[in-house]
Image (tube, grey):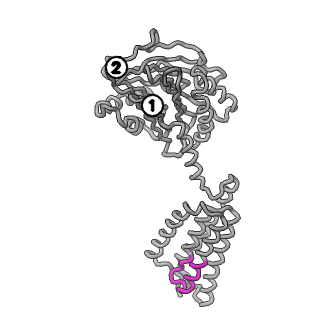
C-alpha cells in the first residue's frame, strides 16, 4: 500500500478545499467557537474514515487537516484551536498506525511526508496568530476585518456633502502602496450661517505615510471632526494645534489646509498650516492660475500657530484644488515641478472634459510621480451660470497679511 497524492487530482482538491475554507470562514464568524470546532471536527473525522476505507489511496485526511489548521487560525481562540489541532494530530496518527499495521509504512511517499510537515507548520503559525489575536482581544474577527472597519469609519468624515445645485465636490484618496490606512484624511461639514450655506472642509496630512501613519491619523481625525464647524473658523487650526500639544508627541506633526466656502456667493477663505497652497483655476482669463497666498506654521511644532489668511471668490466656471504633498511631490525636480505638472494636467483634461466630470479621479492617478506617499485631492467646481458673477471682497482678492491664526 502506497501512501501518496497524485499530483493533478490532489493539488486541485487542495486548492478547492482552501477556497471552500475561505468561503465558509466568512459565514462561520456568525457561529460560536464550540459550534465551529464541532463542525470542523466532524468534517475531519469523516475525512479520516474516508481515507481509511480507501486504504489511504490519496491520503485525503491530509488536505482536510490543512484546511482545519487554516480555518481555526482565522476563527478560533488559542484554546479551541489547540483542541482542534490535537484532534487533527490524532486523525493523522490513526492513518499512520493503519499504514504500520499493514506493513507499508516504509513506502510512505515523499509528497505525503511533505504534506504532514506543511500541516504541522501551518498549525504552528496559526497557533502563534491565535495567541496574538487573543492578546488583542479579537475573537472570531480577523485583523484585516478590523482594519477595514476602521477605514470605513474614517471615510465617513470624507463623504462628499450634498451641496446645492451648481456646485460639485470630488474627494479622491489613495494610501501609499495601496495600504488600507494612510496619514491623509479629509473632514467636512456643511452648516447654515445666517442665510448662507457654508462648507467647512479640512485636508490633513499627518507625518509619515501608509499603514504606519494610519493610527495617528485616525486619532487626529476624531478631534478634527468634532472641531470642524463647531468652533469659529478663525480658531479651528489653533484648536487642532492645542489638541496635538496635549497628546505630548503621540500623534506627531501634521499639516493642514482649511477651507471655508460660502456656497451662495462663492466667497472663500483659506487657512494653511505647513501645507501645500490651494490652487484656484480660472479658465478663459489672462492668468488662469492663482496660487493661494495662505501660509502658516505646521501643527504640533510650536504652542501658537501664525499664518496668512487668504480670501477670494470662486466664480461660475472656476475650480479650487486642495491636495496633499503626495500629489505633487517630485524628489528629483521638487514640489514646484509637481505643481506645474498638476496645472498642466488640469488644463489638458479640462479641454477634453468641458464639464470636469471625473477630473479628480484622473488627476490623482496621472499627476503623482511616485506611489510611495499618501495622496489626497479635493476638487471643488462651480458650474457656469447665467447669473452675474460675485464680486470679490474689497481689498482682499489675492491679498494676505501675517496674523495669528485665531484672528
Instruction: Tell me if I can see residue 125 in this picture.
Output: no
Closer to the N terminus: mark 1 or mark 2? 1
Locate residue 385: give its quadrant.
top left
User: Where is residue 403 shown, x and y percent of the image?
Assistant: 57, 14
Q: Which residue is mark 2?
A: 387
Helix, strand or loop at label 1? It is: loop
Instruction: Tell me if I can see residue 95 in this picture.
Output: yes
Helix, strand or loop at label 2? It is: loop
User: Where is residue 319 shown, x and y percent of the image?
Assistant: 39, 26
Q: Which residue is mark 1?
A: 163
Front residue of this view, candidates 248 and 221:
221
User: Where is residue 191 shown, x and y percent of the image?
Assistant: 53, 27
User: Where is residue 67 shown, x and y percent of the image?
Assistant: 56, 69
Q: Which mark, by number, is residue 347?
A: none
Q: Which residues are magenta?
A: 45-61
Q: Is 150 left, or right, of 137 in this rendering?
A: left
Name the residue located 64 percent from the left edge and 20 percent from the top edge: 304
Locate residue 355: give its quadrant.
top left
Name the residue located 48 percent from the left edge and 68 percent from the top edge: 15
Q: Which residue occupies the extreme top position in the image? A: 395
Q: Is 131 left, or right, of 343 in this rendering?
A: right
Amino acid at each position: 500500500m502506497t501512501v501518496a497524492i497524485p499530483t493533478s487530482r490532489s493539488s486541485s482538491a487542495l486548492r478547492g478545499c482552501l477556497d471552500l475554507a475561505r468561503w465558509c470562514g466568512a459565514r462561520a464568524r456568525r457561529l460560536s467557537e464550540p459550534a465551529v470546532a464541532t463542525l470542523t471536527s466532524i468534517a475531519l473525522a469523516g475525512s479520516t474514515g474516508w481515507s481509511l476505507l480507501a486504504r489511504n489511496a490519496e491520503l485525503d485526511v491530509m488536505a482536510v487537516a490543512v484546511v482545519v489548521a487554516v480555518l481555526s487560525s482565522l476563527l478560533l481562540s488559542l484554546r479551541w484551536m489547540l483542541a482542534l489541532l490535537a484532534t487533527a494530530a490524532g486523525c493523522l496518527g490513526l492513518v499512520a498506525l493503519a499504514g504500520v499495521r499493514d506493513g507499508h509504512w516504509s513506502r510512505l511517499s515523499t509528497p505525503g511526508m511533505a504534506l504532514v510537515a506543511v500541516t504541522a507548520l501551518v498549525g504552528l503559525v496559526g497557533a502563534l496568530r491565535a495567541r496574538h489575536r487573543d492578546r488583542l482581544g479579537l475573537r472570531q474577527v480577523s485583523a484585516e476585518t478590523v482594519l477595514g472597519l476602521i477605514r470605513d469609519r474614517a471615510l465617513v468624515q470624507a463623504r462628499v456633502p450634498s451641496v446645492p445645485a451648481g456646485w460639485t465636490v470630488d474627494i479622491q484618496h489613495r494610501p501609499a502602496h495601496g495600504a488600507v490606512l494612510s496619514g491623509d484624511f479629509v473632514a467636512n461639514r456643511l452648516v447654515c450661517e445666517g442665510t448662507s450655506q457654508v462648507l467647512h472642509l479640512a485636508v490633513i496630512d499627518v507625518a509619515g505615510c501608509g499603514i504606519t501613519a494610519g493610527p495617528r491619523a485616525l486619532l487626529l481625525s476624531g478631534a478634527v471632526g468634532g472641531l470642524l464647524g463647531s468652533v469659529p473658523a478663525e480658531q479651528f487650526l489653533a484648536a487642532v494645534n492645542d489638541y496635538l500639544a496635549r497628546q505630548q508627541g503621540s500623534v506627531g506633526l501634521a499639516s493642514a489646509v482649511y477651507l471655508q466656502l460660502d456656497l451662495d456667493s462663492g466667497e472663500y477663505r483659506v487657512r494653511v498650516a505647513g501645507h501645500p497652497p490651494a490652487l484656484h483655476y480660472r479658465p478663459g482669463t489672462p492668468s488662469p492660475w492663482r496660487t493661494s497666498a495662505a501660509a502658516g506654521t505646521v501643527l504640533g511644532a510650536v504652542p501658537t500657530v501664525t499664518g496668512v489668511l487668504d480670501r477670494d471668490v470662486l466664480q461660475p466656471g472656476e475650480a479650487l484644488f486642495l491636495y496633499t504633498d503626495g500629489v505633487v511631490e517630485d524628489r528629483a525636480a521638487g514640489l514646484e515641478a509637481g505643481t506645474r505638472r498638476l496645472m498642466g494636467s488640469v488644463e489638458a483634461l479640462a479641454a477634453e472634459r468641458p464639464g470636469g466630470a471625473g477630473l479628480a479621479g484622473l488627476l490623482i492617478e496621472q499627476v503623482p510621480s511616485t506611489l510611495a506617499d499618501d495622496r489626497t485631492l479635493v476638487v471643488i467646481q462651480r458650474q457656469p451660470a447665467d447669473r452675474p458673477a460675485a464680486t470679490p471682497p474689497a481689498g482682499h482678492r489675492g491679498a494676505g497679511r501675517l496674523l495669528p491664526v485665531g484672528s
